[in-house]
Image (spheres, rainbow, N blue to C red):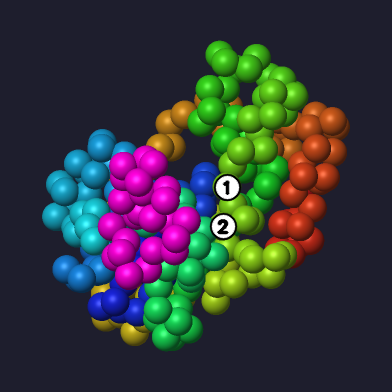
Amino acid sequence: MIISHKHKFIFIKTEKTAGTSIEIALSRICGPNDIITPVAPKDEKYRQKLNYTGSQNYLIPFSKYSLSDFIHMVKKRKRLRFFNHISAKEVKRLIEPEIWNSYYKFTFERNPFDKLISWYYWSGGDKKYGSISNFIKSGDAKKVKGYQLYTDQGKVIVDQVYFFEDIANGLQDVSEKLNLDDPISLPKKKLKGNTRKNKLPYQEILNDSEISWVKTNYKKELEMFDYSF
């Protein structure tokens, strides 16, 4: 997650949508006062290698704490902080209204049929579950975060939801919205992209029961973004 005061944008990071690559790409244009949440150590090292701005300023000021936040801090002995996959709703609660209302807020979503397969392999794949059907039965398939990160009570609360399937054009649009002279582009190294063993299109992987499960559990995304099998 990134809140850039320099360029006045908020990036909400969903799962299995190349979020880390996008985050690293965006960190190139960030300034010293911007909020950038930590990524995995190996990804942080790669960001340092590129000489991009690393994680910073992600501890939340005490002035933004609610009573329950203070209680949680005392119990856990840990400061409240912005984190990787924090929801837009929570970000909105923790920042000034004028910042939320005036900054450009965006995220990325992915075809749920394809996201299920990507999440399956990221979570352990055949070695752990044996099949996608077993993955679904385990309950782990439901744990991927997306829709709930950019909506509140069923309504999208960011300014734009771009598509994983069209990242380049999405980033080009972000660059234009932010009036950047040097457009944003993904880093050359593909991050977290080697866990998926079966590279076939989802139409050739999912069986009827798995397709039905996606249609039931991702009905909102399928309807909202006109995704289809």
**Disc sitting over residue 130 in the figure:** none
Q: Position of residue 208 (x, y in %)?
A: 85, 32
| Residue displayed at 16% across by 48% down | 48
Q: How many marks?
A: 2
Amino acid on which the number 2 mark rests in the picture: Leu
Query: Quadrant location of residue 33?
Result: bottom left
Q: Residues within 10 Å of mark 2 (few under 14, many from 20)?
A: many
Q: Position of residue 14 (x, y in %)?
A: 51, 53
Please tell me whether residue 79 is drawn above or below residue 43 in the rendered image.
Answer: below
Residue 132 visible in the displayed image: no
Please tell me whether residue 105 is drawn above or below residue 80 in the rendered image.
Answer: below
Q: Position of residue 131 (x, y in %)?
A: 68, 19
- Residue 215 shown left or right of residue 77 in the figure: right
Q: Nearer the viewer, residue 185 or 112?
A: 112
Query: Quadrant location of residue 135?
Result: top right
Query: Quadrant location of residue 45?
Result: top left
Residue 214 visible in the displayed image: yes
Q: Nearer the viewer, residue 83 or 26?
A: 83
Please tell me whether residue 218 is drawn above or below residue 27 in the rendered image.
Answer: above
What is the quadrant of the N terminus in the image? bottom left
| Residue displayed at 60% across by 30% down | 120
**Disc sitting over residue 149 in the figure:** 2
Q: Position of residue 82 (x, y in %)?
A: 37, 57
- Residue 37 shown left or right of residue 111 in the figure: left
Label 1 SS = loop
| Residue 69 sits inside the magenta stretch | yes
Amino acid on which the number 1 mark rests in the picture: Lys
Magenta stretch bounds: 59-81
| Residue displayed at 55% across by 76% down | 159
| Residue 40 sits inside the magenta stretch | no
Q: Which residue is mark 1?
A: 145
